[in-house]
Structure formats: C-alpha cells, structure tokens
Image (cartoon, helix red, strand yellow):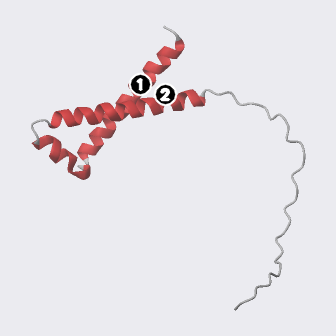
Amino acid sequence: MPKLIALYIKNVAFGFVLSAIFVGLLFWFNVANLWHLVSTSPVGWIAAAMLFMFNGIIFAGAQFAFTVLRMEEPEEPKGGTRAPEPVRPLTPILVEHDAR
C-alpha cells in the first residue's frame, strides 16, 4: 500500500476516534439538552449517528490537512538582505477650515 494511502487511512481513523470522543462528551455534559433529545426520541439513534458521521468527516479532513501541512520542509531565506527603512515619526500638520 502506498505511504500516502496509509497516512490517509490512519488520519481518517484518528479523526473518527476524535469524533466519537467529541460526541460522547456532548452527550455526557448534555450540551443543548442533546442527551435528553436523543434518548427520549424513537429515532434518536439516527441523530446520534449523523452527529458522529458528520463530525468524523470534519475531524478526519482537518487531521489529514494538519498532517500534510506539517510535512513541509523549511526553506532557507532567499534574499531580503537590504536593511529596512527607518520609520519616520508622524508630524502633525495644520489644516485650515472655514467654519460657517
């Protein structure tokens, strides 16, 4: 299996584990009364499954993107040897106005 595919599968699995933890904490702390809504409704399991799946998709994508962006090798600076210009202090100017 190519390394990129293995990396993707590992990060997707980790994202869904994070999603399970997140949804579990949402239900445990009863945020927005979600546990009551899911546990008393006859189709509450569908809501819980959707919450898990959609959060899993988001967490998996974010985890994979974070891992790929961390793989970048640092580049050496390619210039910028000129000294920056000194910042001139601001000086107030007089503006005349004819008040009628």
**Which quadrant of the figure contains the C terminus?**
bottom right
Q: Kindly report the distance in space between the C-alpha atoms of the residues bearing marks 1 and 2.
A: 7 Å
Q: Is residue 1 above or below residue 65?
A: above
Between 1 and 99, the one nearer to me in the picture: 99
The mark total stands at: 2
Question: Could you tell me which residue is drawn at 33 percent across and 39 percent down?
Answer: 22
Question: Could you tell me which residue is drawn at 30 percent across and 30 percent down?
Answer: 53
Mark 1 vs 2: CB contact within 8 A: yes
The secondary element bearing badge 2 is classed as helix
Residue type, label 2: Phe
Residue 43 x/y as whole percent: 13, 35
Label 1 environment density (alpha carbons within 10 Å; few <14, some 14–19, many ≥20) = many
Q: Which residue is mark 1?
A: 12
Tell me: 22 left or right of 83: left
Extreme bottom residue here?
A: 100
Extreme right residue here?
A: 82
Dot 1 or dot 2: first in sequence order is 1
The secondary element bearing badge 1 is classed as helix
Label 2 environment density (alpha carbons within 10 Å; few <14, some 14–19, many ≥20) = some
Residue 81 x/y as whole percent: 89, 42
Question: Could you tell me which residue is drawn at 59 percent across and 30 percent down?
Answer: 70
Q: Which residue is mark 2?
A: 64
Tell me: 78 left or right of 60: right
